[in-house]
Image (spheres, helix red, strand yellow):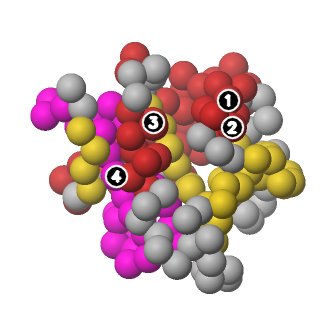
Amino acid sequence: MFFVRTACERDLAKVSALLGQAWHATYDALYGADRVKEITEKWHSAEVLKVQLARRDAEFVVADDGKTLGGMGYAAMSKTEPTVAILHQLYVLPQYQGQGLGRDMFAELETCFPDAKVMRLEVDPQNAKAIGFYEAHGFARVGETANCGGGHSGIAALIYEKTLG
């Protein structure tokens, strides 16, 4: 049985490996294994995760059964919009999907930002499973971007929002 808890520094190598597995399972068919490896090394290294963990206006959670991390979630307040929380990551290993881990982690994350009126996320338009999850949890599509995660990623994404409170 998994429980949701705040991540700590000793989790970061496992979280990095979890993200690599989840990304390969989800995106190899869309982007190719080499591109997924490149992205996960850049976006999901233990060093990048350590910066996320240290951020004060953020929450970093894991789903833990005492032996395995089955999922992770990370959200933070927008740096430019004071009433917007951004759900940056919510991943569950394929073998644990459909067991409520994503739901439980999301339920924790959406309560962590008392000043936020909206939670926003970006999702790949071809990731029907994730889109279905987010829509089932109250998110609605509000736009799209050609560069997921900002910058120049070249990865298209749909933008979804949910009113909080």
Measure how far apart labels 4 and 3 are at the Cα level: 11 Å
Establish if 31 lies above or below 5: above
Query: What residue lies at 77% left-to-right and 29% top-to-bottom?
Result: 126
Q: Which mark is residue 71?
A: none
Q: Is residue 99 left or right of residue 23?
A: left
Residue shown at 39%/40% (left/top)?
A: 104
Q: Name the residue tied to disc 1.
A: 132
Q: Which mark is residue 135?
A: 2
Q: Which residues are magenta?
A: 49-78
Circle nearer the N terminus (1, 4): 4
Pointer 1 local density, CA inside 10 Å: few below 14, some 14–19, many at least 20: few
Q: Earlier in the sequence, mark 4 or mark 2?
A: 4
Kind of residue at badge 1 = Gly
| Residue 122 location (% of width, % of height) | 70, 50
Q: Residues within 10 Å of mark 3 (few under 14, many from 20)?
A: many
Residue tagged 4: 61
Q: Nearer the N terminus, badge 3 or badge 2?
A: 3
Q: Which mark is residue 102?
A: 3
On the image, which quarter does residue 84 sit in?
Answer: bottom right
Cα–Cα gap, marks 3 and 2: 13 Å
Which element type, helix, strand or loop, lies under badge 3? helix
Quadrant including the C terminus: bottom right
> Which of the two labelled residues, at mark 1 and mark 3, occupies the earlier sequence position?
3
